[in-house]
Image: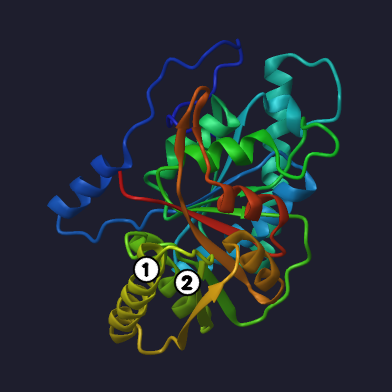
Amino acid sequence: MSDVSGHEPSPTGGANTEQWQDPRAGASSQEARGEAPTPPPVVVGFDNSDCALRAVDRAAEEAALRETGLEILTGWPWELVMPPASMGNAESEKVVREHLDKVIKRVHERYPDMTVEPALSWERAADALISRSGEAALTVVGTRGHGGFVGLLVGSVSLRTAAHTEGPLLVVGPHEERSHGRVLLGLKSVLDDHALEFAFEEAARRNAELRVVHAWQFSPFPDDVHKNTAEATHIKEAVARLRDRFPQVKAEVASVEAPAARELLEQSAEADIVVVAAHRRKRRFGLQLGAVSHALLHHAQCPVAVIPTKP
């Protein structure tokens, strides 16, 4: 089994000094030979926790919908996937490989023809996922894994990955997933076009309807009222344009006077996935998610897709 650099992990410990090879180079060479480039895989973080297993199951489903492969990535420290024990790195690697083999078998029981690649990384789990997120079709992570503090609803790996992901991220919680045939999108502005397009694509793949929620709050100031009215109109126009590209998707827009987080949390109970743009802010300790994304990651009743906004 190779790590994300494409090399065998060293059993001696320490940071991996090998550089991961950019997959775009391989795609370019395929194009030069006249071959169709290999579609990017869905990448899922795995630490053998219950949430990670649910994330793997959902990631495999997403890979099947995209007709692509699955990469199951375990980041350092590998000991988090094992029972508490004092082991050397060589033995740790062996145990981790055994867990990865089991989870690959689990995927192949549902999707026997799916290409599934394991990957070990010397990077911390969140950093490894962030490194891969820019080239993955989708990155998937569970809300909490091993090593977290009891009582936390969302672990540090999920929050850090969401705050820094370079591509679409799906966060899978502990709730039981049910099929409602609905994709839910919280849209603040037409500038969040990446999130809007992702939601349409997801609805098309799932043969689901799309509900776009534009939430706004009352203001006594005429300028704010005009701004909210204009934004609602722009959103309806943007949705209408994408209906032409995705005629199979039944899409509706709901402009509601309510706090966005509360409205989306309530409606998440009847959605297969809720999509939100990552409105990230620079803080003293780095990038942090906006309030709506943060609330959804902690309390949504279905998986949450966080889509990076334009730089």
Q: Residue at x 43, y 86 (%)?
A: 249
In the rendering, at what x and y percent does residue 33 appear? Answer: 15, 53
Q: Secondary structure at mark 2?
A: helix
Quarter occupied by residue 259: bottom right
Dot 1 amino acid type: Glu
In the rendering, at what x and y percent does residue 265 appear? Answer: 67, 64
Classify mark 1: residues with Cα within 10 Å, few (<14), some (14-19) or many (20+). some
Q: Residue at x 70, y 47 (%)?
A: 52
Q: Marks 2 and 1, Cα distance to the nearest angstrom?
A: 9 Å
Q: Residue 158: tell me if it is visible.
A: yes
In the rendering, at what x and y percent does residue 11 appear? Answer: 61, 15
Closer to the camera in the image, 228 or 261? 228
Closer to the camera in the image, 83 or 125? 125
Quarter occupied by residue 108: bottom right
Quarter occupied by residue 174: bottom right
- Position of 95 relative to 219 (above/below): above
Q: Residue at x 65, y 42 (%)?
A: 46
Q: Residue 112: tell me if it is visible.
A: no
Whether residues under marks 2 and 1 lie with C-beta atoms below 8 angstroms apart, the answer is no
Residue named by callout 2: 202
Q: Secondary structure at mark 1?
A: helix
Dot 2 amino acid type: Glu
Residue named by callout 1: 197
Q: Residue at x 57, y 51 (%)?
A: 293
Instruction: Say whether residue 277 is left or right of residue 305.
Output: left
Classify mark 2: residues with Cα within 10 Å, few (<14), some (14-19) or many (20+). many
